[in-house]
Image (tube, rainbow, N blue to C red):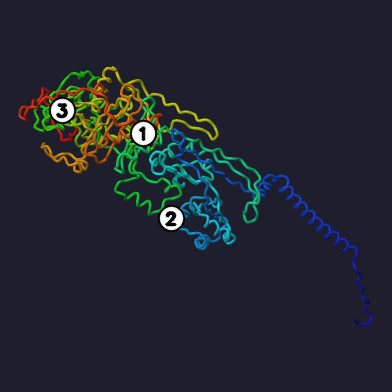
Amino acid sequence: MKPGAKRLRIYKDTRGEGELFRRRAFAGFALILLGLCALVGRYVFLQVLHHDEFATRSVNNSVKPRAIPPARGLIYDRNGVLLADNVPAFRLEVRPELVQHMNDTLAELSKVIPLDQDDLDAFHKQLKQSRRFDSVPLKMRLTEDDIARFAVNRWRFPGVDVVPYLTRHYPMGALFAHVVGYVSRIDADDMANLDPDRYKGTTHIGRTGLERSYEDLLHGTPGYELDEVNADGRVQRVLETHPPVPGKNLYLSIDARVQQAAQDAFEGRPGSAVAIDPRNGQMLAMVSVPSFDPNLFVNGISSVDYKGLITASDKPLINRALRAAYPPGSTVKPFMALAGLEYGVRTPQDSVFSSGVFYIPGQARGYRDDQRYGAGTVNLYKAIYASVNTYFYKLALDLGIDRVSEFMGSYGFGQPSGVDLPGEVSGILPSREWKAKHSPKERNWYPGETVIAGIGQGYWSVTTTQLAHALATFAGRGVPYAPRVVMATADVGKPSTPLANAPVGPSLIKNMKDWQAVNEGMQLVIYSNDPLSTGFGTKLGDGFPYRLAGKSGTAERFSRTSNDYNENKNTAYLAARHRAWFEAFTPAEDPRIAVVTMLEAGAWGAKDAGPIARKILDTWLAAQGGAVPPHQPLPESAIAPASSAQTPPAPEDTPQGDMPAPDSSTAGDDVQ
């Protein structure tokens, strides 16, 4: 500092500093207050405005709903024999949301519990279609050893657990496989068509038979429970339970005893049989041979077992009673005879001469009778019991194909019978319309096609159920009922409720005298002493206390290539060429059961398929409360007298008839 200069003093501005502090303090307080307001606002937002939402989320973190599948309804025969049951079992389930490394977990798990490729394929398939938080079955039907080994190693597999459940079981095995059907695991295709709410927790669905057609009744309604779980998802306690509603039980009209007798009667030969009560349409038996074990399909059939079934030469998976159609042969002749009477084209006494070969006037192509030299003069009764083709050749021509198809259609031929089972085929009823639709290159209908239609050959194709339905309609004096397998339903613990099955229309019979005439002709098939009778020597009616009425049918499987008779009567040769049919009902005067049996390979209808029908009737009779009667011949007074058979003329003297000349003819088969 220079000499003489004044020293400047710097004084502290306490007032300014105080003002600055106050401003900063106010700003800080404002910020604190603002933060506090924001915090309070957030609390209000969470605790007041959105309390219910966040409370629910909080509860959901510890409370999990679990669907409870309903118990599937049981299935019984008409006498209470259990046919489809639910048995307790254990399965291994995986919750994908709790498994971090699925492939590693499966690899380690397979060292504890055996997992085959079928198990893994089914699991991965279902894993793709399920939600992440849903449990997915990995292995069904664990053994006690499987459960014990997993219990020791359970801590190693979070998200994997053993779950108890009810699985379907069929105590009668193959006997009812084609009727009851089976359930199997739900797949992606099923899920696309199912109500997800109704099928929550459900792993199986009806796949075939009654299990499929009555799925809505058998399934029931699912329930649910609320489980309190820990952080690992383990259930700690059950908070609330809403039980499911079990499915309805089904009671079938089929008698297991009759069903067993029918299957045993085939002795393993491929074929089918159907028995119906004409008074109400109730099915008393439905058998398809061979059959299969439906239990194989319940929890996933192995590839080896499935390949064995689908490659088997005798096709056990095909329901021959519903899905296999064959030419009916002479079993349609009673219906043809009735058509002739109903349309006024014939009377029971009108006769036709059978020489062995029938010719359409103006044509060289002959249509043979089964007897080489014919059956002589034939009326309606002899035409039925001797199965005379010539009578029905001429009758078919006189009726014309339009009236034949109209009449046969009224008895259900050419259309599903309406039975309460899925998969029934329609068969083929020969008609102009059918040929025009299926043979666009050849739409004309020829007289030769009408001729062979008259004996159940040519385009004809029927199922055993279809023919049994037609026979039951006739036996019931023309009153048609849709065939029914289920006769009653019941809720668990409650009495059964019968299912009404009203006639689908009035009687088809215009005159009961016509019905009686055809009925008598069918009785003569069983009881006639005429050697020409198709039932002669079979003793199908011996010892049976009720009067039987029946008709055989032997339909050729291959068309013949010439007019010559084949003298080869070797049973094996004939069986390889023929389908053997037999239809019967009893008591003839007031029918209570109508039976149709079919062998895919049988030499003759009466001799091969007839005894099967008789065994079914014997067991049915015993099931009515009485023992099977001994096989004793009926008294002569109960047996129709033999008809006099005229000696046929030589072939060159065969009359040609007086029918108008047709346009053309086609080839066809013509056995009895």
- For marks 2 and 3, give the CA distance: 60 Å
Q: Label 1 amino acid?
A: Thr
Q: Is residue 340 above or below residue 313?
A: above
Of helix, strand and loop, which one carries label 1? Answer: helix
Camera-nearest residue between 188 and 398: 398
Camera-nearest residue between 642 and 196: 642
Q: Nearer the viewer, mark 3 or mark 1?
A: 1
Q: Label 2 amino acid?
A: Asp
Of helix, strand and loop, which one carries label 3? Answer: helix
Label 1 neighbour load within 10 Å: few <14, some 14-19, many 20+ = many
Q: Pinpoint residue 126: horizontal percent, then vertical percent.
A: 48, 51
Query: Cβ–Cβ below 8 Å for labels 2 and 1?
Result: no
First along the sequence among labels 2 and 3:
2
Q: Pinpoint residue 215: horizontal percent, then vertical percent.
A: 46, 38
- For marks 2 and 1, give the CA distance: 43 Å
- Left or right of 459? Residue 105 is right
- Left or right of 199? Residue 628 is left
Q: Pinpoint residue 659: horizontal percent, then vertical percent.
A: 12, 23
Q: Nearer the viewer, mark 2 or mark 3?
A: 3
Q: Is residue 478 above or below residue 292?
A: above
In the rendered image, which residue does mark 3 sit on?
390
In the rendered image, which residue does mark 2 sit on?
118
- For marks 3 and 1, give the CA distance: 37 Å
Q: Label 3 amino acid?
A: Thr
Query: Cβ–Cβ below 8 Å for labels 2 and 3?
Result: no
What is the number of callouts on the image?
A: 3
Rendered image: mark on residue 619: 1
Q: Residue at x 45, y 53 (%)?
A: 122
Q: Quadrant of the C terminus?
A: top left
